[in-house]
Image (cartoon, rainbow, N blue to C red):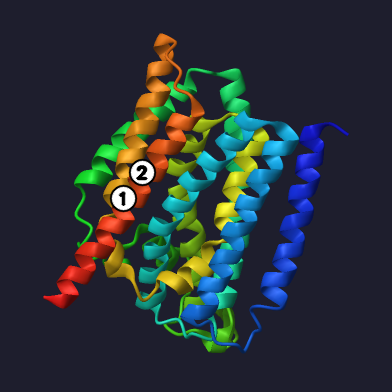
């Protein structure tokens, strides 16, 4: 077996075993997901991703390992921003705590499937049309500038969400969770519950985020192994991140600006390659760590200062 095949095999085994452990032992259906438990699960997934980084370093070399770590940190930071939208969706539809873990699990599985499809298509397109990297770069630059200037504290009215309005038009919906069911029958007719709507909105939300995050990963690496593994590890940690962050939304008000700066940097990095200027992977890693770390620390300091005053 080649080193790359060994890496894929180890990745697959680790993910399957980790899912069995996380879902089977740490997430009993009736168990309450506390902040302490969510923190433990988050540490578990992050530690697993970092352990895989060490494995890639020894198995495939320094460059793929640093690319993987940069891509993972990029995806992980974008996932935090994604989580805040998830929280808005669950709050708007009033999803009961007992149903949240199951709905999140289905949403994450769908996210993994869609990302695998998008990444596969993206890799094929880039191999055939290399100029698409410059299009991705321009898209990231535009997204970063727009994200930086957007107001984080604006109220989001989920009733005006395009996906929700589309579902209202094409499906018979009921305004309750159907006791945890996705469909119910009333008067001989099938209706779709709010649980079904939430799952669809979680999946489509992640698809929208993937339109930014996947091109950003391609800017770091076009190595299939790096792109696949970094994305999947980041998505697998979404569930524990949700429970960890759901009570601390206001403590990360400047994270958006940190992510925006990273997207602008990644976009520029892709565009300058047209002039045969290639930045070392450790520069990307340093920028990602500094921008995301600084924005999180600054957000927490500002939030704590507001609480004191």
Locate residue 72 relative to residue 79 in the image: left or right: right
Which structural element holds mark 2? helix
Residue, disc 2: 290
Residue 215 placement (x, y as % from top left):
48, 35
Query: Which residue, as the protein is rendered here, is positioned at the far right?
Result: 1
| Residue farthest toward the top in the current orientation of the protein | 275
Residue 52, visible in the rendered structure: yes
Q: Is residue 75 left or right of residue 8?
A: left
Q: Which mark is residue 254?
A: none
The residue singled out by tag 1 in the image is 294
Q: Secondary structure at mark 1?
A: helix
> Residue 195's spot in the image, x, y percent?
51, 77
Q: Is residue 172 above or below residue 295?
A: below
Please report contact status of discs 2 and 1: CB closer than 8 Å, yes or no: yes
Compared to 78, does 248 lie above or below?
below
Q: Residue at x 79, y 55 (%)?
A: 13
Give the side of residue 275 with respect to residue 131, left or right. left
Marks 2 and 1 sit apart, C-alpha to C-alpha, by: 6 Å
Q: Residue at x 51, y 40 (%)?
A: 70
Image coords of residue 86 (percent x, y): 42, 66
């Amino acid at each position: 077996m080649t080193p790359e095949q060994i890496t894929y095999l180890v990745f697959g085994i680790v993910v399957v075993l980790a899912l069995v452990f996380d879902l089977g032992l740490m997430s009993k259906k009736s168990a309450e997901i506390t902040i302490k438990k969510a923190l433990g699960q988050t540490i578990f997934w992050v530690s697993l991703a970092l352990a895989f980084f060490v494995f890639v370093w020894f198995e495939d070399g320094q460059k793929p390992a640093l690319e993987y770590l940069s891509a993972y940190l990029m995806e992980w930071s974008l996932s935090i921003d994604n989580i805040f939208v998830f929280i808005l969706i669950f709050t708007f539809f009033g999803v009961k705590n007992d149903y949240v873990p199951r709905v999140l699990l289905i949403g994450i599985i769908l996210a993994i499937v869609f990302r695998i499809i998008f990444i596969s298509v993206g890799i094929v397109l880039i191999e055939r049309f290399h100029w698409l990297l410059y299009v991705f770069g321009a898209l990231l630059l535009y997204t970063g500038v727009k994200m930086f200037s957007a107001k984080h504290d604006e109220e989001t009215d989920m009733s005006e969400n395009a996906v929700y309005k589309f579902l209202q038009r094409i499906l018979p919906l009921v305004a309750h969770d159907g006791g945890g069911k996705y469909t119910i029958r009333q008067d001989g007719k099938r209706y779709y519950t709010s649980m079904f709507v939430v799952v669809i909105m979680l999946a489509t939300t992640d698809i929208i985020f993937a339109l930014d995050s996947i091109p950003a990963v391609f800017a770091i690496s076009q190595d299939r192994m790096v792109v696949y593994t970094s994305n999947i590890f980041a998505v697998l940690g979404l569930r524990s991140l949700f429970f960890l962050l759901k009570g601390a939304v206001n403590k990360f008000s400047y994270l958006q600006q940190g992510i925006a700066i990273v997207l602008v940097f990644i976009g520029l990095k892709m565009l300058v390659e047209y002039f045969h200027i290639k930045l070392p992977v450790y520069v990307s890693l340093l920028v990602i760590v500094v921008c995301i770390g600084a924005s999180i620390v600054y957000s927490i300091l500002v939030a704590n200062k507001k609480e004191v005053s």
